[in-house]
Image (cartoon, rainbow, N blue to C red):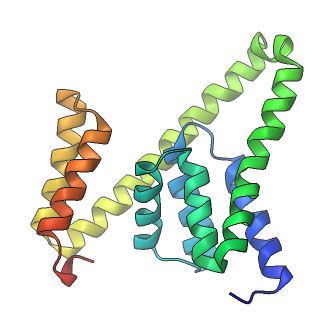
Amino acid sequence: MNRDKNFYWLLFKSTFIVSMFTVGGGYVIIPLLKAKYVDEYHWISDEETLNMVAIAQSTPGVMAVNTAIMLGYRMAGILGALTGMFATVLPPLIIITIVATFYDLVASNEYVQLVLKGMQCGATALLLNVAIDLLKKQFSKKLILPIVIILGTFIANLFFGVNIMILVAIDGVIGFFLLRDKKYE
């Protein structure tokens, strides 16, 4: 793909920022991707975001890096994928290097612990917001099967402790066989 240098800088900068704030696990990337690439830049749709995250989760490696590689490739081919990968990997490497250098100071610092707990709460709120938004979209479509899949997955994991990877695989099989009709997109 033929993109100018400004595009690659914007892709790098925005992906770097998303990576800086992906604290609390891989799923935190979902609301950040949505805010940056769907709402602000209009580069991808909600559906594409969720598809990329689902594929990234089911492939080996770190979900945030896999998602950034797919996004970069989607936007600008191989050079975009490399840009996304480096922009995603760089913030954790910088932070880990700093933390490792000053580990004794950071690990026992009460203020650092409080900041991390606050960030966990914020990440949880962001995930809940995205989940509610997606659920509303499914209800607005008035399609029973996707709602049953959502509720069934939630109940199986929360109340019966079924492994989330098994549930994602089952949901993928259900989607493949039962949701092929275009009206579900």
Q: Is residue 50 left or right of residue 77?
A: left
Q: Is residue 58 left or right of residue 12?
A: left
Vertical position of residue 33 compared to residue 60: above or below: below
Task: Name the spot of residue 14 as percent of width and height, x first.
Answer: 73, 64
Q: Residue furthest bottom?
A: 2
Viewport quadrant of the C terminus: bottom left
Vertical position of residue 51 compared to residue 183: above or below: above
Q: Locate residue 110: give its quadrant.
A: top right
- Residue closest to the eye, 54 or 79: 79
Q: Is residue 130 left or right of residue 91?
A: left
- Which residue is at 62% across, 40% downward? 23
- Which residue is at 15% across, 46% downward? 152
Vertical position of residue 102 compared to residue 26: above or below: above
Number of numbered discs: 0
- Which residue is at 16% across, 80% downward? 181
Q: Locate residue 157: give its quadrant.
A: top left
Query: Is residue 41 at least partly visible in the picture?
Result: no
- Which residue is at 56% across, 66% downward? 70
Q: Is residue 59 left or right of residue 118?
A: left
